[in-house]
Image (cartoon, rainbow, N blue to C red):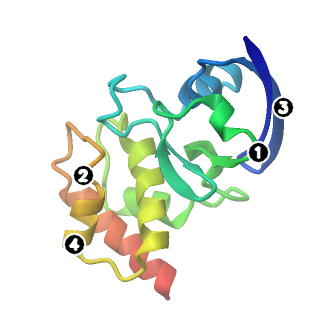
Amino acid sequence: MRAKITLNVNQKPVAAEVEAPTLLVEFLREHLRLTGTHVGCDTSQCGACVVLVNGKSVKSCTMLALEADGADVTTVEGLARGGELHPMQAAFHAEHALQCGFCTPGMLMSTVDLVQRHPNLTEEDVRHGLEGNICRCTGYHNIVKAVLTAARGTRS
């Protein structure tokens, strides 16, 4: 069964017909060609597929595209504005918070939400907030530094 959905993706209106069981991650990657959102585990444990839905981080492999009908969705491709990196992206770059980059889109989206919800983060808050995101390369130290750097920058 196909259903029509309308939503805003990266501040652009999108209308499409999707099969009822289509996951949001599939819709973004296969229908809209926004491949920055990664599929890492197919079990909703790694966090590589995190996007913002109405400003809140969501593992897009756990949400049907139909559930996003009427929502505002932001993917990693929508973070930068006018050629300027989002403060979290800039902090990840400055603090060398990535290696292979596979987890980075999900980490960025999760931490953007984390900073929005908790403006006075501690290192412990960041480590706890990243529990749903797996990185197999970095050991998290520089990721935590980057999040704290970005959080400080958003308070200035």
- Mark 3 or 1 closer to N-term? 3
135 sits left or right of 38 in the view: left
3D distance between C-alphas at marks 1 and 4: 35 Å
Mark 2 in CB contact with mark 3 (< 8 angstroms):
no
- Mark 4 or 3 closer to N-term? 3
Q: Nearer the viewer, mark 4 or mark 3?
A: 3
Q: As shown in the figure, which amino acid type bears the numbered disc 4?
A: Glu
Q: As shown in the figure, which amino acid type bears the numbered disc 1?
A: Gly
Q: Residue furthest bottom?
A: 156
What residue is at 51 percent from the left and 36 percent from the top? 60
63 sits left or right of 150 in the view: right
- Mark 1 or 4 closer to N-term? 1
Picture quadrant where residue 100 is located: top left
- Mark 2 or 3 closer to N-term? 3
Badge 3 is on which residue?
15
- For label 3, the SS is strand
- For label 1, the SS is loop
Q: Can you tell which mark lies on residue 131? A: 2
What residue is at 25 percent from the left and 41 percent from the top? 135
3D distance between C-alphas at marks 4 and 3: 41 Å
Q: Residue furthest front?
A: 1
Q: Can you tell which mark lies on residue 123? A: 4
